[in-house]
Image: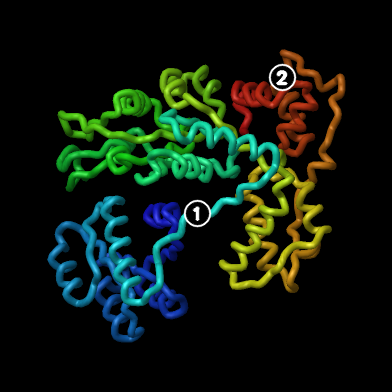
Amino acid sequence: MLQTWLRKSGYETVLVSHFEQAKAEISTHPFSLILTDLRLPDGDGILLMSWVREKMKSRVPIIVMTGYAEVQTAVSAMKLGAFDYLKKPINPSVLEEKIAAALESSEEESGESFLPAKKQWVRGNSPAMLRLYKHVELVAPTKFSVLILGESGTGKEYIARMIHELSQYKDGPFIPVDCGSLSKELAPSELFGHLKGSFTSAVADKKGVFEQARGGTVFLDEVGNLPYEVQMQLLRALQEQKVRPVGSATDINVDVRIIAATNEDLEQAISEGRFRQDLFHRINEFAVEVPPLRDRLEDFDELTAFFIRQANEELGKNVKGITREASDRLKTQRWNGNLRELRNVVRRCVLFADGESIDLDDLPVFAQSVRKLVVEPEDDWALRPDHEKEQIEAALRKARGNKTVAAKLLQIDRKTLYNKMHLYGIEL
């Protein structure tokens, strides 16, 4: 969980569970910070810290995580050279503060910045993206809640950050929330905070996301996955700009900008009773749609070059570019995973490239390409009410999972196909 949170916050992390594994990693890779539990299966955090200081002669800051009963031991660890300690369960906001302080301390000593850089984004100049940017620039200065629509991997969070940076909330924090990871039990505490003792594991007061984001932006990623029971509480917070921590009898005023994103048809979710209509209208004051990669192929070369540069930095390579033949081959693919899939493919190509350019031999083996999947509708594919499910499944098999092609075969639009797939329980 901590590794996922750190990566989303822009840090590169390595996770190990044993003392000896940690020694091996620290011996072979430079680290800017070590976060260790006090108790390890084959040792403890103090032994690890002593080894780092005495054997490795390293001054890398170390933060020790400890249970409540071991606080005195953690204090002793600080006397031995730990930068700080954290009591479990970990409070993300406290962890963030301690990490920033530790890295800033190292930066002052070394003159090198260890804090994560802002995430980069390739703007592109395709008509679809220029239209999107026009909408972003129009809505960003307002207080409208924005709903960002788009397939998985299209870069919805980057667009959310762009809106934040162009808004009056730009000097405040930008806090992303993965709604799919929030259970109905934990969501109220995560979003609105809690008071010490309000439930069994509440050993300290905790600020929720809305309170942390005061004066900034809350980004509700994949908002369609938010538990139904929490949606009413969220609606109240959005309407009144107030939150009530779990266990509290008083409200806290919060001033935040709301940006939500989804790759799901929320209107369909409403009809199925999975999403509240009043919440939908509250977060959908202004909607923008991020186009899929197949609709912005004019940006393909710029995107590929950007991902090559990223992969070079990550892998220590020096690939200059990609041959025209290889690029043309890539452009024929479906790219159902959009930018995320393209980035992964480019990283693999850079890894395997022997020369200065990626060529055809460096490309992975793809499934059928888009150009070979252009299928004209046929009369016998027209949907019949008594066999719709079987026909849809057959069309998806023929189209190799490409829903655009399957919809064309069935002589319906993509939205109708998605609705019918939901209706018959066909996996998306």
Spot occupied by residue 292 in the image (x, y as percentages of width and height): 66, 39
Residue 301 position in % (x across, y down): 72, 53
Query: Which residue of the protein is positioned furthest toward the top in this rendering?
Result: 385
The answer to whether residue 227 is above or below residue 199 is above
- Distance of label 1 from label 2 (alpha carbons): 45 Å
What is the tally of numbered marks visible in this picture? 2
Residue at horizontal 27%, vertical 71%?
A: 45
Give coordinates of residue 13: x percent, y percent: 43, 63
Position of 87 compared to 180: left or right? Answer: left
Q: Amino acid at mark 1?
A: Lys
Q: Nearer the viewer, residue 33 or 89?
A: 33
Residue visible at 31% across and 51% down in the picture? 92
Picture residue at 50% right of the left edge, 54% below the top: 119
Q: Nearer the viewer, residue 384 or 14?
A: 14
Let me know if residue 190 appears in the view: no
Give the residue type at disc 2: Glu
Q: Is residue 268 above or below residue 356?
A: above
Between 190 and 355, the residue placed more toward the observer is: 355
In which image quadrant can residue 381 be found? top right
Task: Name the N-terminal-most of marks 1 and 2.
Answer: 1
Residue 71 in sight: yes
Pointers 1 and 2 in contact (CB under 8 A)?
no
Instruction: List the residue tagged with mark 2.
Output: 388
Pick the quarter of the image with the C terminus: top right
The kind of secondary structure element at disc 2 is helix
Q: Place residue 267 in its image quadrant.
A: top right
Q: Position of residue 25 (x, y in %)?
A: 43, 74
Residue behind mark 1? 119
User: Which residue occupies 73% across, 45% down?
Assistant: 297
